[in-house]
Image (spheres, rainbow, N blue to C red):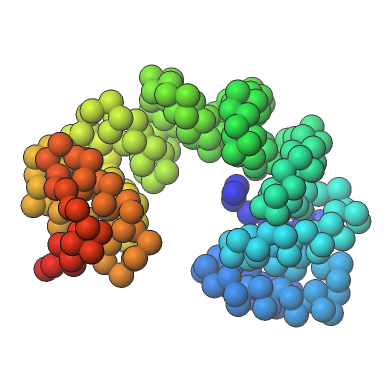
Amino acid sequence: MPKPPPPPSAHRGQAPSPALQRAALALQMGQFAEAERLAGELLKASRTDAGAATILARALLAQNRGAEAIAPLERIARRLEDAGVETLLGAALGGAGRGREAIELLRKTIARRPPFFPAFQELAGQLSAAGRLDEAIGVIEDALGLAPGAVELQLSLARLVLQRNERGRARDLLEKARTAAPGHPEILTTLARVLLLDGNYAGAADLYRQVLALRPDDAMTRADFSACLLEMGDRAAGEANLRLALRGRPHMIGRTTHALAKSSHGRFFFRPSAFAKFLSEP
């Protein structure tokens, strides 16, 4: 989902209340249940508090409970013409399986001026998920026509064209974005993915190292880094990094298994339990 817009109250020049600030901080810190609780209390006092509804919706979406965010967002959307609220409502509708309604709403939102670019990204994401990749690419291309230097849009377009295996175009977009934002972790990981697909394991590994220096707990990046090391023949370092990626994260078992088994310098296990035991060894 795109980055959160400011609460609608901030658009109108109103300073957020201390309670709203606490809810926003909880959301920013990833404390989604606490953000939900605080925003819910504010909405009990005022069902039309746009800032609280926005925070509540984002907290619910982060917990994969988008359907519960629809009602409070619809109440605000009926009162305000706010692209940020509409974008969140589109995300909530999509998350609730109401993709057709979401896409219809988001198409109206991207027609607003000045443009609200997170709406373009949300619409493109939903179109892509619905198998309408060409339309998704067209949406982001239209957005880039309005803001040619927007790094986040360049990144979004690169990810979409990579789904069509247009690695050269994706690489060009990412290199341009990297020049504008040299330390952007998502640009680096996406560019590393392109290099990995191209078989440039050393180049990809270098980019993954840069990201891990910024985000050492990023398990997915560490697993991809391990795959590069294994392909380069550095089995000891590759397996050590896979152990770090898996440690305390049972949900990473599939990704780490894939990295180890698929590599030309990896290992194969007949039983998942044997693999898990191998990676749990010191």
Can you say which quadrant of the picture contains the C terminus?
bottom left
In the image, 253: left or right of 137? left
Between residues 268 and 187, which one lies in front from this camera angle? 268
| In the image, residue 255 above or below residue 201 | below
Q: Which residue occupies 82% across, 79% down? A: 44
| Near-viewer residue (156 or 68) | 68
Q: How far across and down, in percent of the image, does residue 263 sit? A: 19, 40
- Give the tally of numbered discs: 0
Q: Give coordinates of residue 242: x percent, y percent.
A: 22, 55
Q: Quadrant of residue 130?
A: top right
Asked if one can make out residue 233 in the rendered structure from this viewpoint, the answer is yes
265 sits to left or right of 2 = left
x, y (%) of residue 143?
A: 65, 29
The correct choice, above or below, for 270 with respect to 109 in the image is: below
User: In the drawing, does residue 47 fall left or right of residue 87?
Assistant: right
Nearest the viewer among 277 and 75 is: 277
Place residue 171 in its image quadrant. Answer: top left
Q: Residue at x 67, y 38 (%)?
A: 123
Which residue does the image show at 64% across and 40% down from the upper left?
A: 126
Q: Is residue 87 visible?
A: no
Residue 165 in percent (x, y) is at 42, 24
Q: Relative to 157, is 245 above or below?
A: below
Look at 54% across and 72% down and name the residue there. Answer: 31
In this view, which residue lies farthest toward the front? 270
Q: Residue furthest right?
A: 79
Q: Is residue 191 left or right of residue 264?
A: right
